[in-house]
Amino acid sequence: MLYLSSIKKQWKKEFHNPSLDEALLIFSEDEGSKLALIETLKNNIREMRVTFKESDAYGSKLHSIVSNPNTCAIDNQWFWHTVVDKIFLHDLSKIKRILSIYEYYIRQWTAPSQGKDSRRITPEDVQNAKRVPIVNFLENAERGIIKCIFHEDNHASMQIYKEENRWYCFGSCSSGGDVIDLVQRLKGMSFPEAVLFLCNK
């Protein structure tokens, strides 16, 4: 137990902003740390829900202002709606995704154990899923840049970062992520479903 405690202290010194996966891998063996992490996730969820609600309300207000012909010319409304979405509401989908991941892990950790369930994912599953090459799901991705598959694209705007196994669209959807995010969008899957799919479970 003393050894585990010293590892945690060293880890806290070296990693100031751990990813959720790293935290789960380190703390999942110690029940006390697991409970503390669950409580931290619950606090984060509460804060993020407030942020999401405020941002969503602000975005709705901005959209209604832009939609008013007395405020903005009808010919220009499409532009200002895009500005609202890309600048003011850019983080809403990211917040929504993080919320779903946090809620999933809390459900997994607090659910009563019912033996070995092959449909449950582990932090190791997430890490293994992230290692599946993103180029397996995109045509011509070896070139590093392709037309975005999520919107009409006249020019190649989807950048593939093969070393990091990530993607980002610099076009109209302005979205990106890792291979799990890509599979979620391509297949219409939830985070756990995408992880299980990538792990062939």
Image: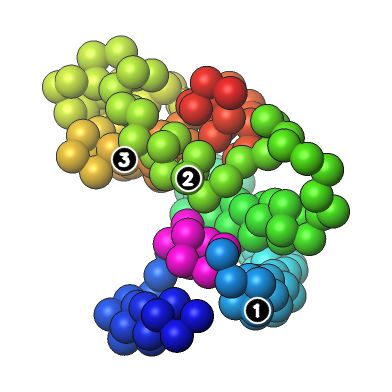
Against 137, residue 22 (above or below) is below
Crowd tier of the residue under label 3, counting other residues whose Cα lies within 10 Å: few below 14, some 14–19, many 20 or above: many
Marks 1/3 in contact by CB < 8 Å: the verdict is: no
Res. 114 in view = yes
Q: Residue at x 54, y 55 (%)?
A: 94
Q: Which residue is mark 2?
A: 124
Residue type at tag 2: Glu
Indicate the position of residue 42 as horizontal and vertical percent values: 72, 73
Res. 40 in view = no
The residues colored magenta run: 21-28
Secondary structure under badge 1?
helix
Q: Is residue 82 magenta?
A: no
Crowd tier of the residue under label 2, counting other residues whose Cα lies within 10 Å: few below 14, some 14–19, many 20 or above: few
Indicate the position of residue 9 as horizontal and vertical percent values: 38, 86
Indicate the position of residue 2 as horizontal and vertical percent values: 45, 85
Spatial CA distance of label 1 from label 3 is 34 Å
Residue type at tag 3: Arg
Q: Which residue is mark 3?
A: 166
Of the pair 190 and 78, the residue shown nearer to us: 190
Against 149, residue 46 (above or below) is below
Q: Is residue 27 magenta?
A: yes
Q: Which residue is mark 1?
A: 32
Residue type at tag 1: Gly
Of the pair 52 and 99, the residue shown nearer to us: 99
